[in-house]
Each structure stands twice: as structure tokens, then as C-alpha cells.
Image (cartoon, rainbow, N blue to C red):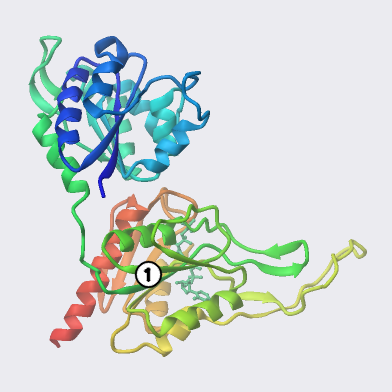
Amino acid sequence: MKKHICIGVSGGIAAYKACDLVSQLSKKDYEIKVLMTKHATEFVAPLTFETLSHNHCYCDLFNPNIEDPIEHVELAKWADCFVIVPASANVIAKVVHGIADDFLTTTFLACHTKKMICPAMNVHMYENEVTQQNLKKAKELGYIVLEPDTGLLACNDVGKGKLPSVDAIVKAIDHLFIEDNTLKGKNVLITAGPTQEAIDPVRFISNHSSGKQGYAIAKAAKDMGANVTIISGPTQCEEINGVSIVSVKSAVEMFEAVKEHLEHSNYIIMAAAVADYRPEQISEQKIKKNDESMVIHMIKNPDILAYAGQHKKENQVICGFAMETENLEENAYKKLVSKNCDMLIANNLFTKGAGFKTDTNVVTLFKNNERIHLPKMTKEELGVKILKTLKEIEEGRKTC
Ligand code: PMT
């Protein structure tokens, strides 16, 4: 089946090169739909892209000729990848800050697939600290940034800012679709998100986990060819195509679901923030506000990771997480050993860019006697790192 590509064209002289790009991609196994900013249409006519792509070219959010008023959302779902070429300083600034004020930027924001941006602009605009910060942010968000070439620019300045050759862009797009079979045949089980421990029918005890870390690992595992199951507490995370999701609320429910899937799993990664305790009694009715104070008696929840560690089989590798606010190293080592994990990923709540709700994480990886401090990276990049390290551990075992 043909892969679907959205090509976003923003306003810059290099827009004319996007015509050749669309022409070349259309001749390959790709179906192309082009989205243009208003400024881009000053450089190239939409009709050129319509002719080259054999598809409608999208320019106007409120085009009365388009039947579907939420076409941008449909297009975002249709795309297997979204490439902005050329990406002006303006459009880069918009997409990294979530500004969605035209067809291109709205669709880009709604799109949750592979994204690539190909900056092309005047060297001084490119080197401006604001643009550099925006490009850094783009990388943190997981977008692939194709570095511009250096040379004589349209404005007669010489420097960095030239759109790479069309051949180089085609190659980079082809690379996005190369199948990764690193984990083919492996079953990966991931816990994600918070648990909710009911007090009465309207109240519960929970925590700040968004599920982003667990889902990002799942996405990475799926892209590496694994069969992936997430046991997920309540989150707002979007479903991932091809990944099974088992939804649970409480720690006890998560425990039961993990037990059910454990036996057939090869890689077990527990990124969920599981409540250690739950109310002993769940009131059947809403608790009334009668007294000045109230006491909820809590009892211990099962430790799911420790259970997996106790029942670990030869063909299983286990990775736990640790969220710490102090003595990160000491606590992480303790958990690595006491829960019989092969690896433990520790994050500190007080580190900027780490922990709950962020798109990035800053962690220390513990295995055997090794401790590796990792730089800030997206949660998906961390997912790739975790999975590759688990594979090394597994292969190391085989050669022992
Ligand atoms: O979901 P996000 O917003 O993206 O945030 C990510 C995260 C901060 C939740 C994640 O990176 C993380 O650190 N997850 C583990 C949080 C935690 O509860 O740590 P802990 O130190 O309490 O637990 C240690 C390990 O035991 C964890 O793997 C946990 O899943 C597991 N555990 C804990 C208690 C329990 N009863 N059962 C368990 O399996």
C-alpha cells in the first residue's frame, strides 16, 4: 500500500524546489497531498502542486468548496508522515509553540505521525538565537530537522540556510519508512499512567502521571517491530495504531491485568505510577461532610513490579522506573535489587524537563553495577534507549 505524505509548503523562495520534490515523490510509492501557507502561494501556484500530486492542494481553512469542515483533522489522520519543506523561520516558530492559524499549521498540530522539517531561510534569520531555540525545541518534540546546506543564498548572502538538494530530502523521507525489525517477534508489556484508588463513588486518590512516558515507550517498541501491550491507568493519551491497550483504574486491576499478560511477555517495562496504598473500605455512598476531620484507613497495594521480578523467566528482561524526590541513587539501587529488575530508570521530580506530564525526560539508567546519566531527551527517544539496552542485556545473557 502506498504511504501517505503531507507536504507543507511555507513562504520562501525555496518553495519552487518543493515542486520537484512532489514530482519525484509522486513517481515513487507515495501518495502526496500538499498544504500551503498563504505566503507560499505568492511563490508557487497551488495548481502546480495539484497537477504534480494529482490531489487537491490545501491552502484555506475556510474554503467553501471543501465539503468537510474538519478536513484538516481528516488529513492529519490520513498522513503517515508530515514534512514541511521549505520551513520558514515563521512556520517553525508556529509549529513548535502550537500556533495553529492556517491549514498547514492546524493540520500539523492535529497530526501525530512522523514529522520532519526542512528549514530554508536567510543565514541571519537561521542563526538568530530565537530560530535556533525553536529548532532545538523542534528536536525535543521529536521532529526530525533536516539541516540546511551552506552556500550562496537567494538574498546574495553566503551562509547556512539553503534547502538541501531534492535528492537528499527524498532520501531522508525514504529513511522515515525503513522498517525496523530490531524487536520483531518480541512481546513487550508496558504499564503506563496513574492508578486511581476509590474512596467512594465520586472520589479517588491518584497522582500526576499523564501516561506519556509509558505510551512513548510503546510507540518506540511498535516502531521497532514488537507486539506491544500497554496496561494503562486512566490517561488522555491517544491510542497508538497497532498497540493493544488494556484500560484499568486501580492498582489491583493493573496487577490482575499484568498477571494475565506476564507469561507471554519478553520485555516488561513498568512506567506506571502505581499507588502504594488504597483505602481499606470503599464507601458505597458519597461520604457526607459531617465531622471536622476524617480518617481513611489505607492498606498496601500489591507491588506489581516486585511480583514480575519474583516470577521472572529465562526469556524475560524487566525494567522498572523510580520517581524520586531525594536520594535518587540510593533508592534506585534498592529498587533494582529488591524488585529483581534487570534495569531501572530513575527520574527526579525536581529536575527541569523530567517526570510527570512533560514530553521530555532526564533520567539515570541503572543496571548491574553500572550507572549512566542520560541527557534530556524526548520520552520516545528514551523509549528507544531503554528497548535497545534491554536487547543488549538479553543478548549478553545468551552469550554467557
Ligand atoms: O506518565 P508521565 O506523566 O509521562 O510521567 C512518567 C513517570 C514519572 C510516571 C515515569 O517516568 C515514572 O517514573 N514511573 C514510576 C513512578 C513510580 O511510581 O515510581 P515508584 O518509585 O513509586 O515505583 C517504582 C517502580 O515500581 C515503578 O516501576 C512502578 O511502576 C512499580 N510499582 C510501584 C508500586 C506498586 N504497587 N507496584 C509497582 O509495580
Q: Quadrant of residue 14?
A: top left
Task: Give x and y (percent) for residue 326.
Answer: 47, 64
Q: For mark 1, give the secondary structure.
A: helix
Q: Quick one: which residue is furthest to the right in this view?
A: 290
Classify residue 6 as left or right of residue 301: left
Q: On the image, numbered disc 1 is attached to which residue? A: 329
Residue depicted at x 47% and y 36%: 73
49, above or below 362, in the image? above
**Residue 109, image x and y in percent?**
43, 36
Res 111 seen here: no
Q: Quadrant of residue 19?
A: top left
Q: Is residue 264 above or below residue 272?
A: below
Is 206 placed left or right of 13 in the picture? right
- In the rendered image, the vertical position of residue 89 relative to residue 285, given as above or below: above
Specify whether tag 1 is near ligand 1 (CB below 8 Å): no
* Quadrant location of the C terminus in the rendered image: bottom left
* Callout 1 amino acid: Glu
Can residue 25 be seen in the rendering of this structure?
Answer: yes
Residue found at x 49% / y 58%:
211
Kindly indicate the quadrant of the structure image that contains residue 309.
Answer: bottom left
